[in-house]
Amino acid sequence: MGNVLLQMEDVSYSYHHQIVLENVTLSVEEGQFLGIVGPNGSGKSTLLKIALGVLQPKKGKVWLFGSPMKDQKQNYNIGYVSQKSNSFQRDFPATVQEVVAAGLASKKGILRRYMKKDYLLVDEVLEQVGIQDLRKRNIGQLSGGQQQRVFIARALISKPKLLILDEPTVGIDRDSTKQFYDLLNYLHKQHGLTLIMVTHDIGVVSSLVDQVACLNKKLYFHGTRSLFVEKEKELLSKAYNHDVQVIDHHH
Ligand SMILES: Nc1ncnc2c1ncn2[C@@H]1O[C@H](COP(=O)(O)OP(=O)(O)OP(=O)(O)O)[C@@H](O)[C@H]1O
Ligand SMILES: [Mg+2]
């Protein structure tokens, strides 16, 4: 067994009195790519926020990089791309390199000025995600797919061990989505990055990721992709409470 990066044990969460997560036990090992699926409102984003330490579980425990969550304070070293991050106003006054450099702010403290070496880092991650030619462009003028790469770059600049993505391809066309998945695959395979991605794209779950979690308040399934594929129909109809149309994607 590899190093466990994230461990949740018996985690429950509720907003006011509405229980949205119930006794979730889940672990992610170093180098894994976990896909999380489940219907709208099933607690997926909430689970990610607990992993990030943005929300505290009402019950249960969370360990990150081997230490209990509480002890880690702000220094988690996790990259995060939130749901609907690729919807900047067209006139948002920041360039690509400024948005990416902002990913260093949490490390540097908001008032520190950027140095030459910071911009070298910016160039490095922009190259990694394949958009170095866009670095002086205004963020609002990029396409959704290009913006998504900017956000990945921003999340990668602090060199996280774990990258968490919440439905990163919503609103992005088929070709850009394919390229985006190629990028994730490259980061996973070539850089050994550990990834957790929430997605509604069941096809990608059965081809790109290596572990799957199926969530609807409770965890209905957590295991390898091949086991998921084997039980897919049964699992999904249980978790979604009805039969879903499974669209086959080829990657
Ligand atoms: N800040 C909040 N205050 C109150 N209720 C919330 C809050 N955030 C989420 N909820 C509720 O908690 C439940 C789970 O929400 P969550 O965002 O985790 O679902 P999700 O699985 O990410 O859904 P989607 O696929 O639509 O993004 C939903 O019923 C939602 O309405
Ligand atoms: Mg969500």
Image (cartoon, grey):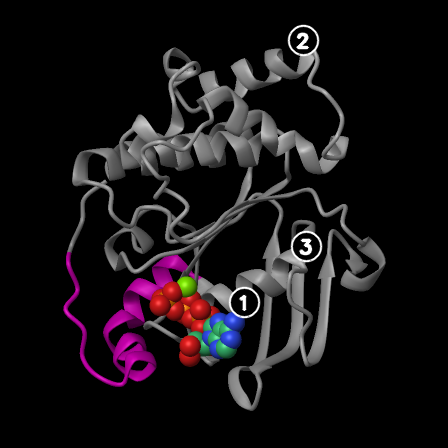
Q: Which residue is mark 2?
A: 116
- Mark 1 against mark 3, which lies toward the viewer? 1
Q: Residue at x 74, y 34 (%)?
A: 107
In the image, is residue 17 above or below residue 233? below
The answer to whether the residue bearing label 1 lies less than 8 angstroms from the nearest atom of ligand 1 is yes
How many neighbours does mark 3 have within 10 angstroms: few (below 14), some (14-19), or many (20 or more)? some
- Please state the horizontal and vertical placement of residue 128, each as a whole percent of the image: 47, 21
How many neighbours does mark 1 have within 10 angstroms: few (below 14), some (14-19), or many (20 or more)? many
User: What amino acid is found at the position of numbered circle 3 in the picture?
Assistant: Val
Question: Is 227 part of what is drawn in magenta?
Answer: yes
Q: Which residue is mark 3?
A: 4
Residue 205 figure quarter:
bottom left
User: What amino acid is found at the position of numbered circle 2 in the picture?
Assistant: Lys
- Please state the horizontal and vertical placement of residue 103, each as a whole percent of the image: 60, 33
Secondary structure mostly seen in magenta is helix
Instruction: Tell me the tag on residue 47.
Output: 1
Q: Read off the magenta span.
A: 224-247
- Please state the horizontal and vertical placement of residue 196, each as a whole percent of the image: 50, 52
What separation in Å lies between label 2 and label 1 (alpha carbons)?
37 Å
Q: Residue at x 53, y 48 (%)?
A: 32
Sequence-wise first label, 1 or 3: 3
